[in-house]
Structures are given as structure tokens and as C-alpha cells.
Amino acid sequence: MVILTRWRGQSLTLSTKPNCLTLSLQSGKETRVFSFDGEGRFWTGMVQNISYRRGLDGKIVAKWQEEGSTQRGRRWLSKEESARLQESARQVCEDLLNDIQDGRLTLNPALDERGWAFLRRAVEFTPQRYRQDVVRYHAVYRPVGILPPDQYMAVVLQAAEGCSFNTCTFCNFYRDRPFRIKKPDEFREHMKAVREFLGEGLSLRRTIFLGDANALVIPMPRLVELMEAVHEQFDVEHLGGIYAFLDGFSAEKKTPEDYARLRELGLRRVYIGMESGNDALLRFLKKPGTAGDVVQAVQAIKRGGVAVGIILLLGAGGHQFAQQHVTDSIRTLQAMPLDADDLIYFSELVEGEGMEYTRDAFQAHLHPLTPEERIAQGEAIEQALSFSEDTGTPHISRYDIREFVY
Ligand code: SF4
């Protein structure tokens, strides 16, 4: 339902969808847009051409287009900035609700029942409620390290915690926790807590993501039991299926029959951080497994009827590895039976202080690629790829881990 009207000297567009409420206010050249999930949490916003996205953990990322550049700017808001933005969005909802209730504004058509419920819930999300919501989030989840970009709107279910390898020098996502697989009853409790936490906000979620870093290394009998438990609490089909990472494919090898069984249980896509097709570079990165292992894993997954998402690390190994990284990554990708259901992501290496990779690269006298050279590396790989017209081309896009939000 979309309602257009004038309110307090501005144009107001009020849009209610089954899963969210969006308010858009325009005054002269200034546009403000705020949207809320079914529970009333601020979700996205746009103010003075800066877009905002709030994660369930309460963190808000601001993004904008740099003037005269194709580059995007980005910054995570401080707690105070986040609170101010959330409160200004809530205040708009409160003013609107009061004006409607007190007869100062008449909407035509009138708000339907869902619209009223959404608006009231957004008003009820006071600063204190936001603080409580973040506390609840952290009671339900261990920090969600990373997700593929097409899974930011998933319902994350942590069937396992951490990464069973934790050796890759460029990855600090799970260093704070040992790998462990949840027992079915503990996982059921976790899922129940996730459901209760999301509340009506569940309707905004699009898929189920089985966490953490490599849930698919869980041995088959235990994995089947955990995935069956997901069906007890979620309508997997309605939510768009189950997605998960598989990393360190040298360990628990699953057969095409295993993947076919997992497909029956709702598995739709497996994301593999291949990083590079060059084994020497994989060794330098302390990534478990070889490029050949990835090809075998992809063959088994695809034969089981499940799609894949392959992630490559741009800039890894600097100039010294650049040529072989490109050549071998192209060769490895071309050895995979990829089709239009699959994804290829180019993820830029993000170096940070205290990261093992940064130290190793320094000690090995590697010359890092500039951001432009990293992008060019992705373009070189993409341009060299060719796919069969019969099966179609995988979707290829960028993956910026600095923008990850859940
Ligand atoms: S296997 Fe994946 S999650 Fe684990 S350390 Fe390596 S990149 Fe990180």
C-alpha cells in the first residue's frame, strides 16, 4: 500500500509492504527516507544523499558516492551517531502517528491494519528499546563474522561456531573462538531464541544461512540432524532455502550423493572461499587445501544439484604472485562446471594491523597492489572467462567485506 500526501510542508510517501514500512519525506531538494522492519527496528535510511543500513547488532554503516569519482565512501557510525539517527527516524514516526490520531492529518486511503501496527512498533523503538535490542542480539548470537553479500538479509543460524581451520593469515573473523558444533538440542534453543529476537522482523529475511565459517564440514549424520532441526522451526522453502560456507575442503569430503541429500533438506548454495587458483599462493596464505580440492568439491556439489559461490581474493600475494594468481585462478575457474545458478565474487584483500598476512607480506618483501590494481586484477580474470551458452554465465560481482552488515 502506498499513500501520498502533504504533511508539515513536505511531500510524504508512506509505503507499507508485508515485511516493512517506509517513510519518504521530500522538502525542496532534501529527501529523507526511513524504513523499518516488521518489529519496528530502523533498517535503512537516506538523508542528504547518504544511505544508512542498520545491522541487527545495532551497527550502522553510512555510504555515499564520492563526488566526481566512481568510488564509494563509507563509514561506520559511532554509537552516539547511530542513536541520533535511530531517534530522528523514530521521532518522524511519532509525529506522524500523533498528527493522524489527533486529526491534523487525514490519509487517503487510510492506513490499513498492518500500516498502523508497523507505525506503532516503529514509535515504540525508543533509545532504551534499541539498547535492549542490542543486548538481546548478543545473547542470541556469537558475533557473525562474515556473510556473502547476497546473504546479508538471511536468518543466520549458528549450527557451529567459529572456523575449524583458523589458519588463513588474511582472516581474523573467528580468531576469538574455538570451532565447535552445536548439539541438536542446543541448536534448537538457539533457533528458538533467534525467532523470538527477530519477531515480526523475520518477514524481512530472505534465506537461512547456516553459520559459522564452514558449517558444511560437519560430518553428514550430524549435519543432517541439524538441518532437519531447522525444518522443525522454520519454513525453509518459504524462506528461500539454506545457504552455507564450505572452507578448508581438504578435510571432510562429501560425495555428490551427500549433496543431493542436503539439497533435499533445503541446501541451495555453498560458498567457497577459494581465494586463488595458485597453490603456492594458497600455501603462502596458509589456506587449507589446494585449487584441485576446490574443483573436486565444486564438481561434487554441482552433481548433487546445489549451486556454488566462489570467492577470489584480489591483491593477495602482491605483485610477486599477481601473474600466477590471475592465470591459475582463470584456469581453475574454467575447470569448474559453473553455470547461471552460480556466483563468482571478487573480494579485495583488506590488510589490517596485527594481521598475520601483513607481517608475512612484509617479511617476504611483497609489493602490495594498489586498490586500482586489485580491481584491474578482477577485471583481467573476469574478461578471460568464458562459459557455455547452454548452461549460461555465473553472476560475477564485487564483495567488499568492509560493508558487511547483519
Ligand atoms: S578457512 Fe575461511 S573462515 Fe577459516 S580462517 Fe580460512 S578464510 Fe577464515
Image (tube, rainbow, N blue to C red):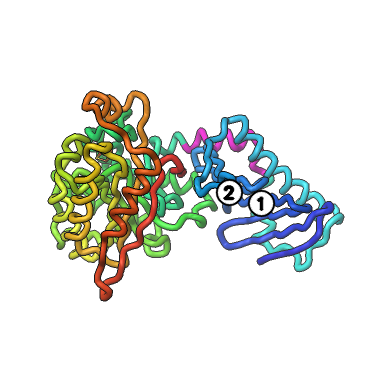
Name the quadrant where ligand 1 sits: top left
Whole-percent x, y for residue 367 in the image: 29, 32
Query: Residue at image x 19%, y 34%?
Result: 284
Q: Marks 2 and 1, Cα distance to the nearest angstrom?
A: 8 Å
Is label 2 in contact with label 1 (beta carbons under 8 Å)? yes
Ranked by sequence position, the earlier of labels 2 and 1 is 1
Q: Position of residue 24 (x, y in %)?
A: 69, 55
Residue 131's x, y, as percent?
Answer: 58, 33
Residue placed under numbered mark 2 in the picture: 44
- Inspect this view and state whether residue 124 appears: yes
How many C-alpha atoms fall within 10 Å of the one at disc 2: few (<14), some, or many (≥20)? many
Q: Nearer the viewer, residue 352 or 157?
A: 352
Q: Position of residue 88 (x, y in %)?
A: 70, 41
Indicate the quadrant where residue 113 lies.
Answer: bottom right
In what element is the residue under mark 1? strand
Which three-letter amino acid code belongs to the residue tagged 2? Thr
- Amino acid on which disc 1 is placed: Val
Q: Quadrant of the N terminus?
A: bottom right
Residue bounds of the magenta highlight: 124-137
Q: Is residue 160 above or below residue 257?
A: above
Considering the numbered disc 2 on the image, is that residue within a helix, a strand or a loop?
Answer: strand
Secondary structure mostly seen in the magenta stretch: helix
Instruction: Tell me: residue 208, above or below residue 182.
Output: below
Residue at left 16%, top 55%?
295
Residue depicted at x 80% and y 54%: 10
User: Is residue 384 rendered magenta in the image?
Assistant: no
Total residue callouts: 2
Per the image, the residue denoted by label 1 is 33
